[in-house]
Amino acid sequence: MAKIKITQVKSAIDRPKRQKETVKALGITKMQQTVVHEATPQILGMVKKVSHLVKVEEA
């Protein structure tokens, strides 16, 4: 399966609790932090929910 790099580019401050928890569940704890995940349907769904806060690239 393909890998994707997810980088937080906007703050989760003043966002709904569900979006904050989704960013945390992706493993992102700081701004500009990049994590690498497999492109599973679950991860892609999480990324879609917070797409306005993160940047996604293929790894």
Image: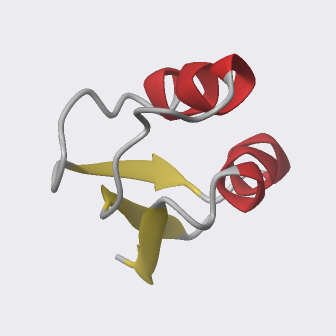
Residue 19 drawn at (x, y percent) = 65, 33
From what the image shows, is residue 10 above or below residue 20?
below
Total marks in image: 0
Q: Is residue 44 left or right of residue 15?
A: right
Q: Residue at x 75, y 60 (%)?
A: 48
The C terminus, quarter of image: bottom left
Residue 25 drawn at (x, y percent) = 53, 22
Q: Is residue 54 left or right of residue 49?
A: left
Q: Residue at x 50, y 33 (%)?
A: 14
Residue 18 drawn at (x, y percent) = 73, 23
Q: Nearer the viewer, residue 36 or 52?
A: 52
From what the image shows, is residue 43 above or below residue 56?
above
Q: Quadrant of residue 12?
A: top left
The N terminus, quarter of image: bottom right
Question: What colour scheme governs how the chains and residues are painted in the rendered image of this protein?
Answer: secondary structure
Q: Is residue 29 left or right of residue 11?
A: left
Q: Residue at x 42, y 73 (%)?
A: 55
Residue 2 drawn at (x, y percent) = 56, 70
Q: Residue furthest bottom?
A: 58
Q: Nearer the viewer, residue 20 or 36?
A: 20
Q: Residue at x 49, y 59 (%)?
A: 53
From what the image shows, is residue 12 above or below residue 33?
above
